[in-house]
Image: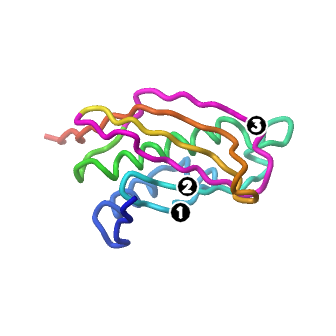
Amino acid sequence: MEHLESNSETVAAIRDSFSKQGLMMTIGAKLHLVASGEVRLRIEASESLTQHHGFLHAGIIGTILDSSCGWAAQTLMPLGTEVLTVEYKLNLLRPAAGQHFEGRGTVVRAGSTLTAAEAAFYTTDDPDRLIATMTATLIGVRPRSSD
């Protein structure tokens, strides 16, 4: 995977998009890595993000994986393109027990209209402990002009 330079326009666009998503701030997500076709997001567990058994809620896992797939797709699109999710499938493989987690989104195929991506969700307390996977289809859209 080609790593993008920290001052590249693509990284700046991803960081800008990330900063505008209030949900990322609300759940305490952090943008950990931006590379060509890959984005990693990290999150720490807190009581406010758990379900009734004390595990990280599946909705939080889905949010992290959907977002990591979307931004991974955006790294391969022309500057100024925004990304929307067309569909995704989330597989929850085991309870999200732990304190620190990472969602790793990667592009499988970047098409001219649709992009296929996949993501994996791990606890970084035990990096080999896979918690969930996602496959996603995304579409790039150009913002509408205000004219």
Residue behind mark 1: 32
Q: What is the spatial separation of the Cα atoms under label 3 and label 2, in whole angstroms?
A: 19 Å
Part of the protein shown in magenta: 84-112
Q: Main secondary structure of the magenta part?
A: strand
122 to 95, vertically: above or below: below
Any mark on residue 41, and which? 2
Secondary structure at numbered mark 2: strand
Residue behind mark 3: 94
Mark positioned earlier in the residue sequence (2 or 1): 1
Question: What quarter of the picture does the C terminus occupy?
Answer: top left
Mark positioned earlier in the residue sequence (3 or 2): 2
- Rendered residue at 76%/53% (across/down): 46
Amino acid type, label 2:
Leu
- Rendered residue at 70%/53% (across/down): 128
Q: In this rendered view, identify the residue nearer to me: 72 or 24.
A: 72
Amino acid type, label 3:
Arg
In magenta segment, residue 89: yes
Tell whether label 1 touches label 2 (CB within 8 Å).
Answer: yes
Secondary structure at numbered mark 1: strand
